[in-house]
Image: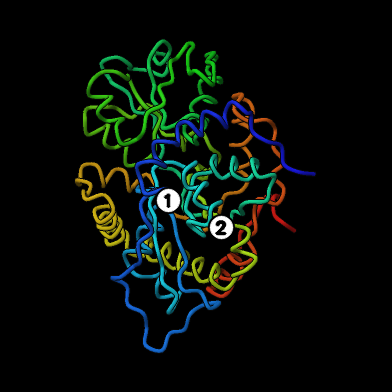
Amino acid sequence: MSAARPLATLRTLAAIATLPLLLTACGYGSQAKSDDTAKVAAGAKKIDGLDSVKIGYFGNLTHATALVGREQGLFQKELGATKAEYATFNAGPSEIEALNSGSIDIGWIGPSPAINGYTKSDGKSLRIIGGSASGGVKLVVNPKKITSLKDVKGKKIATPQLGNTQDVAFLNWAAEQGYKIDPQSGKGDVTVVRTDNKITPDAYKSGSIDGAWVPEPTASKLVAEGGKVLLDESSLWPDKKFVITNIIVSQKFLDAHPKAVEAVLKASVESNKWIKANPDQAKAAANKQLEADSGKALPAKVLDPAWSSISFTDDPLAATLNTEAAHAVKAGLLTKPDLKGIYDLTLLNKVLKAEGESTVDDAGLGVN
């Protein structure tokens, strides 16, 4: 049975929200750039005869596996003479468009756009092939206006984008508090203001929002501006774990070039292993890559608390993705989807076994 499609209104609004990104960033995110700083080992050969593998990610610390893997040259090392090329994105819909068009082959992305991309294509466009990060999402508020969770009612709370992962999480939390909010307009007992993470700190400083449910490092940027963490989303999940970043791949690319996909997954596993063994060095490496991508590094007062709230994992935490999909359905942003087949963890588990690590589970949502 094919996967159910998201609501047409969500598709339309998401497309409108994505349009400026597509127009201002060379088509999709930033232009793909070769990793010219990473050295190719002497005698290295191309994988599957490919000239390049195109990798996408966001300039967020929740995508630090990709940031560190690039900065440390781990992707290039595993790809041999096949060039690692990169593109950065500001929002999930634009990355899904890039994946669908072939502008990227593999990407780091949040659960909601992965779900939407899968369901909109009737389960034909992508697979989730690995995990990357958990946590790193907080509700930060103006302490002069909001001193308790009850004070959120009647206030203006920012989320990054209609239907994105944090938007869904906030709407679900608000519903559990008994607040009624129209999911499309964001109007109701709480006003949801969809705001790009890049401008959320300025919106907070100007007083146009009273708080925000956002990922790192935006949450810590707000704290640096005087905001207070009212709620850490991890406290709402069993074992305080929930997927914030997945690894996705074009199904066409996976079918045609499994060796290249395996190489990228091996580099991802190595990146997470290095992050855990060298947390301070890894934090510095991620910040260095953020500076290279955006032209600006994060100050320590933002970087340190942001980094400490994220955990990096190869496990895609599949059961929590299923729960997040249920939250989107409950919020009225998604019709009930059939996610069977969204995961293909075959290559990841192959890599983990070879590394002597425990394999991971797809929660019954795998291809087999």
Work out whether residue 97 or residue 214 is closer to the camera in this orientation and state it.
97
x, y percent for residue 172: 55, 26
Secondary element type, mark 1: strand
Q: Which residue is mark 2?
A: 249
Height in image: 36 above or below 129? Answer: below
The vertical placement of 219 against 127, above or below, is: above
Identity of the residue drawn at 61% across and 64% down: 254
Residue position marked by numbered label 1 in the rendering: 311
Of the image marks 2 and 1, the number of the one nearer the N terminus: 2
318 horizontally vs 134: left or right: right
Q: Residue at horizontal 52%, vertical 51%?
A: 246
Crowding at mark 1 (Cα within 10 Å: few <14, some 14-19, many 20+) = some
Mark 2 is surrounded, within 10 Å at the Cα level, by few (under 14), some (14 to 19) or many (20 or more) other residues, namely many
- The location of residue 166, given as percent across then percent down, is 47, 33
Name the amino acid type tagged 1: Ser
Image position of 364 (left or right of 359): right
Quadrant placement of the C terminus: bottom right
Which of the numbered marks, if any, corresponds to residue 284?
Answer: none
> What's under tag 2, amino acid-wise?
Val
Find out whether the residues at labels 2 and 1 contact each other: C-beta distance under 8 Å.
no
* Residue at 39% in and 70% down: 74
User: Up-down: is 142 above or below 102?
Assistant: above
Q: CA distance from mark 2 to mark 1?
A: 22 Å
Displayed quadrant of residue 226:
top left
Instruction: Say which residue appears at 26% left-offset and 47% top-offset.
Output: 304
Q: Residue 169: x and y, percent? A: 51, 31
